[in-house]
Image (cartoon, rainbow, N blue to C red):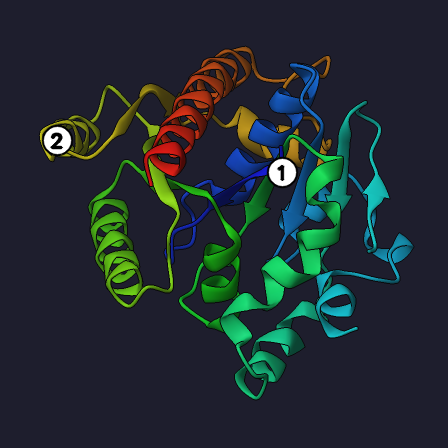
């Protein structure tokens, strides 16, 4: 069965998108899923959690233009990395024929090598994001527990629906993940209540706001590593379990639809 492709996407920065991407990928790999983390963001934050900046020569830009995959220290987890060169890809895609299909075409030779691919998308609505969303089979939207986070979540979902209506996007919404949540703040509780009352498919897991997240980034620690923040590690562990259940349910649903078609 070809790999499931999960796009982690929202156009707002500061929503823990890359942190969620690397911990989901690491968690799936440590649950014995063959996983490829695809860093589509020129900021290369996901890539930097596994590789120093000066060790990479090829990235998604090279793959789309012409299989460059880097093995990580975690068994079962590889990375298709990013560098600043990926910023050029957005400009080049504009002049390409069927540009929305280019990311899927690039990763197509790898689909049978993995159970799942996690795509970390840049915080924008550019051509790379559209191509990556087109390649995805499902989407996770991380929304930080702030008014701007709530606004960004709604704006992204509205834009994604426009792409769906235009038959560009076919990916399922796997769920919305509330991140950087502080139960002691009124705004955090209000955002949680509004999202839970929105009818959106919310993950039951809530990712708390912890200063330990910065330490984990600085030390390149992900779920399953010694020394991770306990609260974050436990929360992302629950999130991974939820994702596995929803991925399997989505696959089963697609299979039933395919048989009835």
Secondary element at tag 2: helix
Disc number at residue 30? none
Secondary element at tag 1: loop
- Going by the image, does 180 lie left or right of 42? left
The furthest residue to the front: 260
Q: Position of residue 47 (x, y in %)?
A: 71, 47
For the residue pair 37 and 152, the one nearer the viewer reads as: 37
Q: What residue appears at the point 40 percent right and 27 percent down from the top-left corner?
A: 209
- Going by the image, does 259 lie left or right of 69? left
Disc number at residue 190? 2
Position above or below: 162 against 250: below
Q: Is residue 42 visible?
A: no
Q: Is the residue marked by circle 1 packed among few (<14), some (14-19), or many (20+) residues within 10 Å?
A: few
> Residue 37 falls in which quadrant of the image?
top right
Position above or below: 14 against 202: below
For the residue pair 167 and 82, the one nearer the viewer reads as: 167
Location of the C terminus by quadrant is top left
Disc number at residue 2? 1
Estimate the spatial distance between the alpha carbons at disc 1 and disc 2, rounded to whole Å. 40 Å
Q: What residue appears at the point 26 percent right and 28 percent down from the top-left corner?
A: 202
Q: What residue appears at the point 55 percent right and 38 percent down from the top-left corner?
A: 21
Location of the N terminus by quadrant is top right
Q: Position of residue 6 (x, y in %)?
A: 50, 40
């Amino acid at each position: 069965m070809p790999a499931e492709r999960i796009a982690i996407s929202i156009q707002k920065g500061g929503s823990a998108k890359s942190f969620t991407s690397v911990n989901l990928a690491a968690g799936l790999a440590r649950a014995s899923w063959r996983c490829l983390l695809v860093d589509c963001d020129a900021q290369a934050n996901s890539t930097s959690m596994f590789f120093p900046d000066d060790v990479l020569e090829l990235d998604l830009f090279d793959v789309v233009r012409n299989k460059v995959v880097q093995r990580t220290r975690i068994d079962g987890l590889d990375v298709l990395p990013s560098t600043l060169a990926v910023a050029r890809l957005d400009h080049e895609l504009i002049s390409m024929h069927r540009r929305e299909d280019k990311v899927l075409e690039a990763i197509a030779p790898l689909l049978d090598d993995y159970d799942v691919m996690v795509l970390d998308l840049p915080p924008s609505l550019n051509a790379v994001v559209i191509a990556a969303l087109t390649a995805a089979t499902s989407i996770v939207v991380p929304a930080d527990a702030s008014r701007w986070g709530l606004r960004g979540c709604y704006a992204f979902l509205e834009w994604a629906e426009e792409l769906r209506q235009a038959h560009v996007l076919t990916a399922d919404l796997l769920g919305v993940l509330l991140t950087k949540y502080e139960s002691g703040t009124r705004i955090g509780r209000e955002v949680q209540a509004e999202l839970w009352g929105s009818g959106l498919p919310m993950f039951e897991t809530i990712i708390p706001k912890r200063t330990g997240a910065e330490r984990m980034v600085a030390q390149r620690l992900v779920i399953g590593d010694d020394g991770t923040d306990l609260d974050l590690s436990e929360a992302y562990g629950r999130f991974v379990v939820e994702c596995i259940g929803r991925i399997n349910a989505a696959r089963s649903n697609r299979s039933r639809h395919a048989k009835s078609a």
